[in-house]
Structure formats: structure tokens, C-alpha cells
Image (cartoon, rainbow, N blue to C red):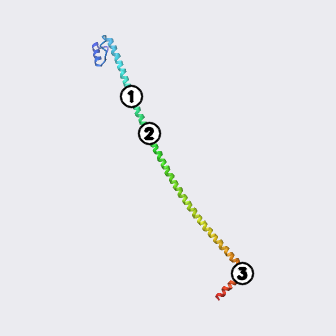
Amino acid sequence: MDSKTLKEMHTFCRDNQIKGFSKYKKKQELLNFINNEITIRDAQLAQQLFDSEDNYMKKQQEELMKKQKLEIEEKRRIDKLKKEEQQKQEKIMKMEQDDEYQQALQADLKMAEEEEKENKKKMAEEEMVKYKEEKDKKYAAKISNADLQLMRLARLSRFS
């Protein structure tokens, strides 16, 4: 910029839309003004760039947070579905166990009834044997040898 003339610097200001340059009539004052304006514009551009990057990063963070929230919600939904499925499986298993228990209980009751019938049958047979033994004892005790001899003779007399 130092090598340019005052007119060239005025043209530079017009081309770059720098306002307020016409009041400077000395080359050094205009040079200082241009350097100051360029520094201000650079600072503004830097601020705009920073703001733009900041907005971009904020949007990226928001999108990432939304994505993470969606992932967390999806995971919770899946966990809830898994838990419900596990509860259903446990309920089915419990019902199956209850059915098995009922069947086993019915089988045990049936076996107990059969054992009771067999015991009653054995007891009836034992009572029958005892009754026969007692009957035989009674009849054997009542009939004396003499009576028995008379009965034999009577039978013989019938057949002869």
C-alpha cells in the first residue's frame, strides 16, 4: 500500500466499499485510515466466521444430543419389550409348572386310591382267612370225637 499514490488509494477505497476516505487529504493519514478499516473488517470477518462456526458446532451438538436421546429412548423401549417378553415367558413357565403339579397331584391321588383299594382287598382277604380259621375252630371244637364217629356211621349206613 505504501507504493500507491493518493488517487490509487481512493480508487482502492471505492472498489472495496470503504466509506469516509474522502476527508483524508494526506497519504499517511489515508494509509492509517485504510489499515484501520481493514483491521476492523478483518475483525468483523473473524467474528462472523467465529459466530458461524459456533452456530455450526451448536447445531452439530444439538443433532448429536437428539440422536443420543433417540438411541436412549429406543434402548429403553427395547428393554421394556424384553422385560415384558421375559414376564410373559415366566408366566407361561409358571402355568406349565402349575399344570405339571396338578397332573402329578392327580396321579398321586389315583395311586393312593389304588393302594387303598389294594389294602382293603388284602384286609378283606385276611379277614376272610381269619373268619374261615375261626369257623373251622368253632366247628372243630363243637363236634366231639364221639359225635364225629356217629356222623361217619350214619353216612356209611346211607350208602350201604
Characterize the local packing of mark 3: few (<14), some (14-19) or many (20 or more) Cα atoms within 10 angstroms: few
Q: Is residue 29 above or below residue 91?
A: above
Q: Secondary structure at mark 1?
A: helix
Residue name at image x 70 percent, y 78 percent: 142
* Label annotation for residue 55: 1
Residue name at image x 65 percent, y 87 percent: 158
Quarter in which the C terminus is drawn? bottom right
The one of 46 and 89 positioned closer to us in this rendering: 89
Q: Secondary structure at mark 2?
A: helix
Characterize the local packing of mark 1: few (<14), some (14-19) or many (20 or more) Cα atoms within 10 angstroms: few
Mark positioned earlier in the residue sequence (3 or 2): 2
The amino acid at mark 1 is Asn
Characterize the local packing of mark 2: few (<14), some (14-19) or many (20 or more) Cα atoms within 10 angstroms: few
Q: Are marks 1 and 2 in contact (CB under 8 Å)?
A: no
* Label annotation for residue 145: 3
Q: Are marks 3 and 1 in contact (CB under 8 Å)?
A: no
> Viewed as shown, does residue 88 lie left or right of 8?
right
Residue at numbered disc 2 = 73
Disc 3 from disc 1: Cα separation = 134 Å
Q: Position of residue 33 (x, y in %)?
A: 34, 14
